[in-house]
Image (spheres, rainbow, N blue to C red):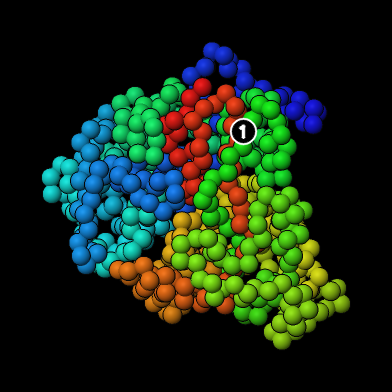
Amino acid sequence: MLRVVRSAVALLGACALGATAEAQTLRMMKSLDAPHYDGARTTWSPSSDIVNMIQDTLVAMDWDGKTAVPYLAKSWTVSPDGKLYTFKLRDDVSFCSGKKFTADDVVYSFKRLVSPELKAPLAWRAGELEDIRSLDPYTVEYELKEPFSDLLLNLTMFTTAIHNKESVEALGKDYGVKAIDGTGPWCFDSWQPRTEIVLKRHDAYKWGPSLYQNKGPVKFEKLSIKIVPEDSSRLAAMMAGQFDVTHQMPLQFLQQVKAAPMLTVQEAKPNFQLLYYGYKSNRPMVADKRVREAMNIAINRAEIVKGIALGNAEPAYTYIDDKALDFAAGTKGMIKEDVERARKLLDEAGWKVGADGIREKDGVKLAPRVLFTQVGLFPRISEAIQGYMRKIGVDWKIVGFDSTIAPAEMAKQDYELWTVTFPYMSAGDLLNFYFDSRNMPAPNRMNWNDPQTDELLHKGKAALGEADRAKYYGLAQERVTSEHLWMPVMNVGMYVTSNKKLKGVRPHMLYQNTFYKGLDYSF
């Protein structure tokens, strides 16, 4: 361990230089960078956490993970038919640029989000927007074509952050790359891709949401966020005191970190985060449900969790955690690990074992291309599953990419499977995100175009009561699970590791954004 620490000190030593002189700089470390930081144009969580530091939303998510509380909107009312929301806005908010925040910024941000030109992958989070209008500088009417039972929860997400029109139009394609304006507690300062993001304090900020004791401004002059992809380097750097906080400590090192006298580890609760492999269901090799089911039931999830995550996760046999809102109990038991049944399913699907042990059909090897991001547990889990697949005659061709180019590689559509971890708030959140046909080609990378699923999701979204919402979302879960569109592997815990001198640390569960606003952090 001493050798690893010394190696990391040599590698990251520059991070510690001048630490005393920069006593007002909070030093954070993360494993993943992003292609840009415009939250309206991405689904990528490495973008979302930075966006939430720089920009604000109309409402915020409370610590319970299910309650929307006032933020830029200080109050709201909803019409009896669930179609009209009237938001009363704060009148004391300004952007980092100094521009005063008004209803016009809200109207612009949502019209931009849902515009056909932007092609925002998560525009559905805004609901079926009929119109959005300002009644006066601090009142917005938000009119839906139909009710959206999850609207307020979705308005807590980085996708629906409020933008400054002047900043967007002045920067054009460089918006979120060279600069970005926001009303958040932190302001964009600089970004060196794959190296460091630097944010500075928004001195005028004083409108923090109720979940924080400190309403602003933040207690540090700067926030330095270093990108450190190597797992062992992140461990060693925290042990050596080079960083104050990280939310991406490798699970296999958690027990060691918990035992370190200078560090504190906290788990975000509640937390729903699934590591899964998805099938592009219209690719010939995985178009047959029997092939997808065979792969799903051929792996040993308990072994993977124990051997790779060292027990710091739970095996996942359903897409939704059974503790999440609107979980469908009927999905339990749909995925039953059974290697012999897996082989029979592949036989029935016409894939016969060749001389080299790999199955073939019509002269084609059963060798699906599988994409993963080269960070965390993804390489080891992909290799482990590759080994399970060979036992049933399937030759996974696993291909890893850096996090900054992984979204672009996925956009090329040239693969049979991919893997990510997905943080979600409820069954409806996950289902609407991934399985609505309107979200093809991303985030519906399965290319699942199924009228029955769409209808069930529509009914769940439009439900005015909790019972109907749970009923239709439950039926949608059963539908997509029975089609084996995903291989759920594990429910991943989300942890924050911090130096004990750092006070006010409490991990948030929102979309892996455990830091969220960081308003209570101090030395």
> Taking 253 as reference, is 112 left or right?
left
**For the point 51% across and 40% down, which residue is it?**
507
From what the image shows, is residue 12 above or below residue 149? above
Furthest residue in direction right, as rendered: 355
Q: Position of residue 271 (x, y in %)?
A: 53, 51
- Of the pair 87 and 180, the residue shown nearer to us: 87
- Quadrant holding the N terminus: top right
- Of the pair 348 and 397, the residue shown nearer to us: 348
From what the image shows, is residue 163 above or below residue 278? above
The 10 Å Cα crowd at callout 1, few under 14, some 14 to 19, many 20 or more, is some
Q: Position of residue 70 (x, y in %)?
A: 30, 44
Q: Which residue is mark 1?
A: 264
The image quadrant of residue 115 is bottom left
> Taking 340 as reference, is 242 left or right?
left
**For the point 35% across and 28% down, which residue is it?**
216
Q: Position of residue 242 (x, y in %)?
A: 63, 25
Q: Position of residue 404 (x, y in %)?
A: 56, 45
- Of the pair 226 and 282, the residue shown nearer to us: 226
